[in-house]
Image: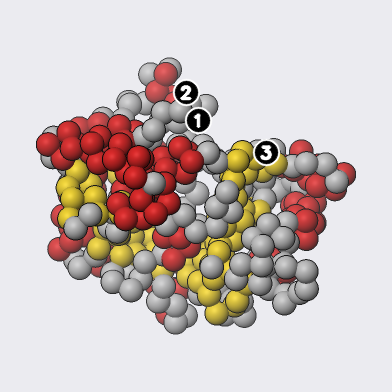
């Protein structure tokens, strides 16, 4: 199986913390859609005919487009055609990211005429002061109403995104955020620590002393509260930042962590076919011009065995399924497995890793330092 990701690079406004490629502009929308259509044709053989079981519209803000337009893109991806092109089933998981203020009555009604069956709502916070600080375009009331409207329309597979460690939010306020989230009876919650990325307005604001910086200890406290409350409400932490009721895991994102191939469409989108990774140019105008001119619009690297091992360690340790040493032996051989085993022993001693029947997992403390733990297990070429 395989997945397809479609990057819609338009936003109403740029959030202060965001480092994803997106534009707070309506310019070049028709040209983008035409280029995207052409890219779908140009990349038809990338997945070598592998059946597609997930499609994910992210951004940016894909909900700025009417559902009718998004459905048209879906139908381009679901032939069947000849010549080894990917075939996506409308019965698979088809996710749409939605900004809360886009979930109007008319928008939700129009969704009923599309194949979308899963929704990821960019809430970030249920507190208006946080939303102002983050420069979000919606209010807390918008967020709650968006969830309720989708539920009233008969949709159950709904996830919400939250951000913790916001300087404007105390621990008690983060707890209130979580209480509201769990009270909405959604089966999936993604929660991410606020990070200060170079080149973002937030980084500039902090450098100019116009905003306080992120406090690491505060983020640790709020992350622990998140894990405890999620567990108390029957949610499984199936990936470090993702919590769901059993049976409601996000299949598309889970496939990323399990190394399943995917095709990325749109400017800045990444693709992986098991042998190489490639990434589209992060410029809307260049993306459009290069596709229309028949020029290359992406870069690519062939993955070495060391890179494949490093990626497996990094992604598998983030999940509840852990790092399986039998898979490691099968895919990379005994020499690399022996390196992993010896390197893991000190991490077990420090209480950051644990092992059960040949599978290695991050401990609760290890989850606080997941990237650092993985880096210590990496092979350095």
Query: How many numbered marks, from 0 up?
Result: 3
In the image, residue 29 sits, relative to residue 108, either above or below, namely: above
Quadrant occupied by the N terminus? bottom right
For this view, does 199 lie left or right of residue 360? right
As helix, strand or loop, the secondary structure at mark 2 comes to helix
Q: Residue at x 78, y 69 (%)?
A: 83
In the image, residue 365 sits, relative to residue 31, either above or below, namely: above
128 or 304, which is in the foreground? 304
As helix, strand or loop, the secondary structure at mark 1 comes to loop
As helix, strand or loop, the secondary structure at mark 3 comes to strand
For this view, does 78 lie left or right of residue 251? right
244 or 364, which is in the foreground? 364
Residue furthest to the front: 334
In which image quadrant can residue 358 be found? Answer: bottom left
User: Visible in this render: residue 359?
Assistant: yes
Of circles 3 and 1, the one toward us is: 3
Q: Residues within 10 Å of mark 1 (few under 14, many from 20)?
A: some
User: Disc 2 versus disc 1: distance between alpha carbons?
Assistant: 7 Å
Q: Position of residue 22 (x, y in %)?
A: 60, 43
* Disc 3 to disc 1: CB gap under 8 Å: no
* Disc 2 to disc 1: CB gap under 8 Å: yes
Q: Would you name the residue on which mark 3 appears?
A: 299
* Disc 3 to disc 2: CB gap under 8 Å: no
Q: Would you name the residue on which mark 1 appears?
A: 200
Of circles 3 and 2, the one toward us is: 3
Q: Would you name the residue on which mark 2 appears?
A: 204
In the image, residue 163 sits, relative to residue 152, either above or below, namely: above
180 or 113, which is in the foreground? 113
In which image quadrant can residue 320 be found? Answer: bottom left
User: Disc 3 versus disc 2: distance between alpha carbons?
Assistant: 29 Å
The numbered mark, 3 or 2, whose residue comes first in the sequence reads: 2
């Amino acid at each position: 199986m395989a997945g397809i990701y479609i990057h819609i690079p338009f936003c109403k406004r740029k959030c202060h913390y965001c480092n994803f490629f997106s534009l707070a502009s309506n310019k070049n929308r028709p040209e983008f859609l035409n280029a995207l259509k052409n890219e779908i044709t140009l990349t038809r053989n990338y997945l070598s005919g592998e059946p597609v079981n997930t499609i994910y519209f992210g951004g940016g803000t894909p909900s700025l487009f009417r559902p009718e337009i998004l459905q048209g893109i879906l139908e381009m991806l679901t032939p069947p055609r000849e010549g080894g092109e990917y075939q996506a089933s409308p019965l698979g998981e088809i996710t749409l990211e939605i900004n809360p203020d886009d979930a109007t009555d008319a928008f939700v009604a129009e969704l009923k005429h599309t194949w979308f069956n899963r929704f990821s709502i960019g809430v970030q916070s249920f507190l208006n002061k946080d939303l102002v600080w983050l420069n979000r375009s919606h209010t807390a009331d918008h967020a709650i109403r968006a969830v309720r409207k989708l539920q009233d329309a008969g949709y159950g597979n709904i996830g919400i995104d939250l951000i913790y460690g916001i300087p404007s939010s105390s621990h008690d306020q983060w707890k209130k955020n979580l209480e509201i989230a769990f009270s909405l009876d959604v089966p999936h919650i993604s929660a991410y620590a606020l990070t200060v990325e170079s080149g973002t307005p937030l980084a500039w604001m902090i450098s100019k002393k116009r905003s306080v910086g992120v406090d690491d200890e505060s983020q640790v406290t709020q992350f622990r509260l998140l894990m405890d409350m999620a567990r108390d409400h029957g949610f499984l932490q199936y990936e470090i930042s993702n919590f769901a009721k059993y049976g409601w895991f996000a299949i598309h994102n889970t496939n990323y962590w399990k190394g399943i191939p995917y095709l990325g469409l749109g400017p800045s989108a990444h693709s992986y076919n098991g042998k190489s990774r490639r990434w589209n140019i992060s410029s809307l105008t260049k993306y459009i011009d290069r596709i229309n001119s028949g020029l290359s619009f992406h870069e690519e690297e062939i993955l070495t065995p060391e890179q494949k091992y490093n990626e497996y360690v990094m992604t598998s340790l983030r999940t509840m399924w852990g790092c399986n040493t039998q898979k490691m032996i099968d895919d990379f051989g005994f020499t690399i497995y022996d390196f992993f085993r010896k390197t893991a022993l000190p991490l077990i001693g420090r209480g950051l890793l644990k092992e059960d029947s040949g599978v290695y997992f991050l401990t609760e403390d290890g989850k606080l330092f997941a990237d650092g733990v993985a880096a210590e297990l990496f092979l350095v070429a």
